[in-house]
Image (cartoon, grey):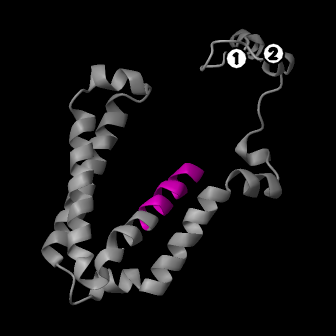
Amino acid sequence: MSVAEETLRKRPKINALNNETSEKETESTEPPPSRRTRSVKQFLYEEWDTLSWIGGSLAVTYYTDFWMVVFYGELVNRFLLHCAVGLFLVGMVAMAILFWRHPKLHYTNWLQEAPIGISIATVLFLLGILSITFSLWPIWGIFTPSILFIIFMSFISILSLL
């Protein structure tokens, strides 16, 4: 173990809310268990909300035939659907460029280093969400935003597991 790792291990962790050192954190010098060393029961207990979003999304996509409707539905507004896909892709490319140019950039520094990048990506994602909602509205009506929200949260939950 290097000197830097020993120093980081021995340094007390500071509570961000009240800037005090907790006694429990200073007594224990063991690092927290990694995701790979957790038991199945502990994993299920800690990740129940993530797994519930994924399960909800599987149920929604199965019972609404989401992918069949998106790919083959006659009522789908294809122009808006293609616009939504394009906006999502451009937004993801913008975020990838931000992460590629600034790999160790903290959230507080983003506004100084790339002030317009996050704004552009946010606007693109919002326009994409509106486009996909309007393109699928003729099929599910008022339930369209709920269905899309559940599928989006499942996507975010899958990314949090990686």
Q: Are marks 1 and 2 in contact (CB under 8 Å)?
A: yes
Bounds of the magenta span?
151-162
Q: Amino acid at mark 1?
A: Lys
Q: Quadrant of residue 85?
A: bottom left
Residue toward you, 153 or 86: 153
Indicate the amino acid at tag 2: Thr
x 51%, y 53%: residue: 159
Measuring from the top left, give residue 57's x and y in whole percent.
50, 71
Residue most extreme to the left: 79
Q: Is-magenta flag for residue 159?
A: yes
- Secondary element under disc 1, as helix, strand or loop, is loop
Q: Quadrant of residue 96?
A: top left
Q: Secondary structure at mark 2?
A: helix
Q: In the figure, is residue 46 to the left or right of 141?
A: right
The outermost residue toward the right is 27
- Pointer 2 residue: 26
Q: Which residue is mark 1?
A: 13
At 31% from the left and 42% from the top, the residue drawn is 95
